[in-house]
Amino acid sequence: MTEPIYLVAGARPNFIKLAPLVWVLNSRRDVPFQIIHTGQHYDRAMSQAFFDVLNIPEPDVNLEVGSGTQANQTARILERFDELLVEKPPSAVVVFGDVNSTLACSLAASKRQIPVVHVEAGLRSFDRSMPEEINRLVTDALSDLLLVSENSGLVHLRQEGIADEKVRLVGNIMIDSLVRMQPRALERQAAIRLGAVPNGYALLTLHRPSNVDDPATLARLLGLFASLSRKLPFVFPVHPRTRKQIDALGYAPPKDLLLVEPVDYLDSLCLQKQSRLVLTDSGGIQEETSCLGVPCLTLRQNTERPATVELGTSTIVGNNEQLIRETFDRVLSGQYKQGQPIPLWDGHTAERVADQLHELMQRI
Ligand code: UD1
C-alpha cells in the first residue's frame, strides 16, 4: 500500500492554502494524505477558528511546538517533525508558503530523502531581513517539485538555477478559498457587528517585525493612522505579536481607530470587501484585495508578490508618512487605479496542484 503524503501547516496563512487542497483531494480520493499541524499558531483565533470556517478536518498529528525565537521555534519543529518522519514515513511532504514551519519541515524531509513539494514557490522580496525570505530561499533550494503562484516565481527560480522540469506554474491556491468562501463571507455583516459602517472605513492589519517590533516605528505608525482616522474611521484587527507591542507602549487609541481581536477568515474577507481601502503588511491580504478589487496600501518597502502591484490593486507605500497620506487621499478622491485579473488566480489552483501530486505519486 502507498504511504500517505503529509500536508504540513503551522501558521494562519497556511491554513487558507491547505483547505482547498484538502477539499479537492477528499473528493478525488486518488492521493492518500494526512494533515500535520506543527502548532506554530495555537490560539483559537489564529488556528482552530480557521479549521472551523474552512471545514478542514482535525489534523492527524499536532506537533504542538508553540512560540519562541526564530531559531528556537524552527529547531523544535525540525526535531519533532523528523521524529514523525522516522516513526511513520510518508511518500512525500507538501509545504505551503514561507513560514518557519515551511522551512523546518522541508529541511527535515529532504534530509530523510523524502520528496518535498512547495506550494507557493519562487516568490522573492530580495529582502533578507525578513525571516520569510530566508524561509522561501531555503525551501525552494530543497524542494523536488516547485508549484508557482505568479509569473515572477518562474523567473526567480530560473535565475537561481533550479531545473525547469521541477517547476510548474499552477496559480494562487489562496484564491481558491476566497472564490469558494466569498458568498458566505458577504453574509457576515462583520463591519456592522464591529461597530463600523460598510464602505465607510479603512481596514488596517499590521504584524511584520519591521513595523511592530521597534517601539518608535510602531508609535509613529499608530500616530499616523490615528490622524488619518479623522478623515475615515479605521478598523484594526490586532495580531497577537502586535498586541504585545501596543500594550508595552501603553498606547490608548482614539475612538475612530478601532482596535479589535483577530478575526476569522470569513470576517476578514467581509471586512476587506466592505472597506474603502485596506492598509496592510500581510502578503495574503495584498493578494486577496487584488482579487476583491479593493485598493491596498502595502505597508512594506518591497513585495514578493509583484503581480499585486503590476496587475492588482496594491501600491507599495512602506512606512513613509507622506506617501501613505497621498495614496490614502487618492483613494478617497476616486483617483486610484482599478486593477485587472491575475492569470491563473481563478479558483482552480488546488485541482492543478492535485494533478501534480497524482503525477508525482506515479513516479515515486
Ligand atoms: C507568522 C509568519 C508570518 C505570517 C504570520 C501570520 C514566520 C516567520 N512568520 O508570523 O509569515 O505572516 O505568521 O500570522 O513564520 N502568538 C500568539 N498566539 C498564536 C501565535 C502567535 O500569541 O496563536 C504570538 C507568539 O507568542 C509570538 C508572536 O505571536 O510572540 C509571533 O508568532 P510567530 O508564529 O512567531 O510569528 P508571526 O508574527 O505570527
Image (cartoon, rainbow, N blue to C red):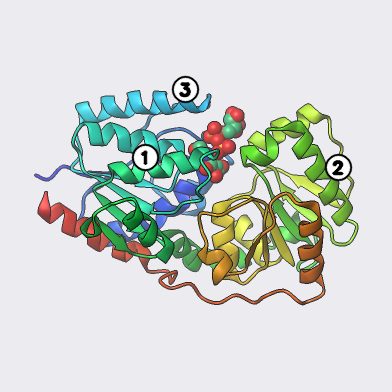
The mark tally for this picture is 3
Label 2 – label 1 distance at C-alpha: 40 Å
Query: Regarding mark 3 in the picture, which secondary structure is present there?
Result: helix
- Camera-side residue of 278 and 347: 278
Q: Is residue 338 visible?
A: yes
Tell me if 207 is positioned left or right of 127 in this view: right
Look at label 3 and name its amino acid. Asn
Tell me if 109 is positioned left or right of 41 in this view: left
The structure residue drawn at horizontal position 89% and vertical position 61%, both measured from the top left corner, is 231
Q: Earlier in the sequence, mark 2 or mark 3?
A: 3
The residue that mark 1 highlights is 138
Residue 60 in the image: x percent, y percent? 32, 38
The structure residue drawn at horizontal position 47% and vertical position 54%, both measured from the top left corner, is 54
Which label sits in the foreground, 1 or 3? 1
The structure residue drawn at horizontal position 37% and vertical position 69%, both measured from the top left corner, is 348
In this rendering, the answer to whether 124 lies above or below 346 is above
Q: Quadrant of the N terminus?
A: top left
- The answer to whether the residue labelled 2 contacts the one labelled 1, judged by CB atoms less than 8 Å apart, is no
Residue with the most extreme left position: 1
Query: Regarding mark 1 in the picture, which secondary structure is present there?
Result: helix
Query: Regarding mark 2 in the picture, which secondary structure is present there?
Result: loop
The residue that mark 3 highlights is 72
Residue 71 in the image: x percent, y percent? 46, 25
Determine which of the numbered discs, if any, sits on residue 253 in the image. 2
Q: Is residue 58 visible?
A: no
Q: Earlier in the sequence, mark 2 or mark 1?
A: 1
Label 1 – label 3 distance at C-alpha: 17 Å
